[in-house]
């Protein structure tokens, strides 16, 4: 019996060593160690041997079985690695190849594209981009921005107040402009600062030129020795980058609670010259005026600095300018979009024109 065991062991070991795949190994395992195989059968037969032979025979058969099991396991581990590597190589997909057929990659919505275009201009001038909360308090949206207690924008007909959302200065509302971030930023960052704040704002308004939600970009620069000339130069660079190098600016006196003096800023019309088209017809974009109103602006009111004086802003030392523009308005002017609602209807025939 011991001889037979060693014959089987030799033969099995040779075949296992020669196997070339894990499926061949599995077949050999069944053949030599399976329930009906000879070696396990011999092991079972040990008990039938005369007692003096049992010990040696049992030991030999057991060792043979353990040896073959170990060999099978070692070979199997080797094949597992090899086969996994081969299958990975075979199944590999080059994700950088174009699809077949090539899939359209889509493009930004006109409002996102316009926002990014404006951000690029100001980043180029050294400004940072920050965002702020859309849900604000009366304090940041109105009070700290020097709004008179009777300012009409505070009215429930103009502003979305959150029901049960606090009282007085703590009353919660949906911000009506991005200007509250002027105060939040100054509370957190000492001068000098130069930032823009893009974001969503909300007003109770709805027609062809007003939607309850729209987008603004706020700008704020504070330093020492800042003048209205700096404001005009900055906005001229912006206007030329967005509307063309030939543009000029016009500042008209206006009122905003948080700037003094305040101005409304017009850009010379890029469709016509002085309001008249080349054939002499009246330009419809600027309505014959030669100017397009693009944003509100002004020098930061000392009262706003006073509200953040404990954060390093001193109305006697610091000056700054601020501006606020509507992203929808810039996009409408630049691309001749006639109705604000097109931006939100998600009609692909409209959106794809700006891909
Ligand atoms: N917050 C104003 C609005 O929503 C726009 C504006 C005007 C912002 C003048 C400014 C500014 O920063 O200086 O109508």
Image: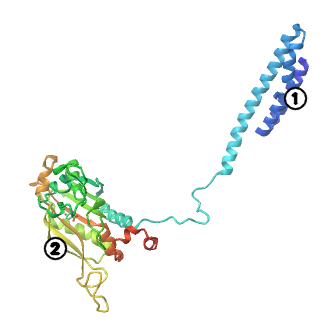
Residue 214 versus residue 6 in the image, above or below: below
Residue tagged 2: 252
Judge from the rendering whether residue 342 lies leftward or rightward of residue 29; answer left or right: left
Given the current orientation, which residue lies at the most extreme left position?
Answer: 316
Name the spot of residue 77 as percent of width and height, x first. 71, 34
**Foreground: disc 2 or disc 1:** 2
| Displayed quadrant of residue 146 | bottom left
Given the current orientation, which residue lies at the most extreme bottom position?
Answer: 279
Residue 57 versus residue 19 in the image, above or below: above
Along the line of sight, the residue nearer the viewer: 154 or 240? 154
SS for callout 1: helix
Q: Coloring scheme of the render? A: rainbow
Q: Quadrant of ligand 1?
A: bottom left
How far apart, in angstroms, are the residues tagged by discs 2 and 1? 102 Å
Name the spot of residue 255 as percent of width and height, x first. 14, 67
Q: Within 8 Å: ligand 1 and the Cβ of disc 2? A: no
Residue tagged 1: 11
Q: Residues within 10 Å of mark 2 (few under 14, many from 20)?
A: few
Q: Quadrant of the C terminus?
A: bottom left
Name the spot of residue 93 as percent of width and height, x first. 62, 54
- Between disc 2 and disc 1, whose residue precedes? 1
| Displayed quadrant of residue 82 | top right
Judge from the rendering whether residue 31 lies leftward or rightward of residue 80; answer left or right: right
Is residue 143 visible in the rendered structure shown here? yes
Residue 125 marker: none
């Amino acid at each position: 019996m011991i001889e037979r065991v060693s014959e089987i062991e030799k033969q099995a070991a040779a075949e296992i060593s020669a196997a070339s795949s894990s499926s061949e190994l599995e077949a050999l395992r069944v053949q030599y160690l399976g329930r009906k195989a000879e070696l396990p059968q011999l092991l079972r037969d040990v008990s039938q041997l005369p007692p003096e032979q049992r010990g040696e025979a049992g030991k030999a058969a057991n060792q043979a079985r353990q040896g073959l099991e170990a060999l099978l396991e070692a070979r199997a581990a080797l094949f597992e690695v090899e086969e996994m590597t081969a299958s990975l190589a075979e199944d590999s997909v080059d994700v950088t190849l174009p699809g077949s057929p090539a899939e359209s990659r889509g493009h930004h919505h006109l409002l996102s594209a316009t926002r990014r275009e404006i951000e690029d201009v100001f980043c180029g001038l050294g400004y940072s981009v920050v965002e702020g909360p859309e849900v604000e308090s009366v304090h940041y949206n109105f009070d700290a921005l020097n709004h008179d207690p009777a300012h009409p924008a505070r009215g429930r007909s103009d502003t979305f107040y959150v029901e049960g959302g606090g009282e007085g200065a703590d009353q919660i509302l949906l911000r009506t402009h991005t200007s509250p971030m002027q105060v939040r930023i100054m509370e957190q960052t000492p001068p000098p600062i130069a930032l823009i704040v893009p974001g969503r704002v909300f007003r109770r308004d709805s027609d062809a030129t007003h939607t309850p939600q729209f987008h603004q970009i706020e700008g704020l620069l504070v330093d020492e020795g800042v003048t209205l000339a700096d404001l005009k130069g900055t906005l001229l660079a912006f206007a030329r980058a967005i509307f063309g190098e030939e543009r000029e600016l016009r500042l008209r006196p206006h009122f905003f609670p948080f700037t003094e003096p305040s101005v409304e800023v017009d850009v010379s019309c890029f469709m016509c010259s002085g309001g008249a088209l080349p054939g002499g017809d009246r330009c419809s974009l600027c309505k014959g005026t030669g100017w397009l109103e693009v944003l509100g602006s002004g020098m930061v009111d000392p009262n706003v600095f006073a509200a953040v004086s404990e954060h390093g802003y001193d109305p006697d030392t610091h000056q700054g300018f601020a501006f606020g523009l509507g992203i929808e308005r810039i996009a409408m002017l630049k691309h001749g979009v006639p109705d604000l609602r097109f931006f939100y209807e998600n009609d692909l025939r409209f959106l794809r024109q700006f891909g």
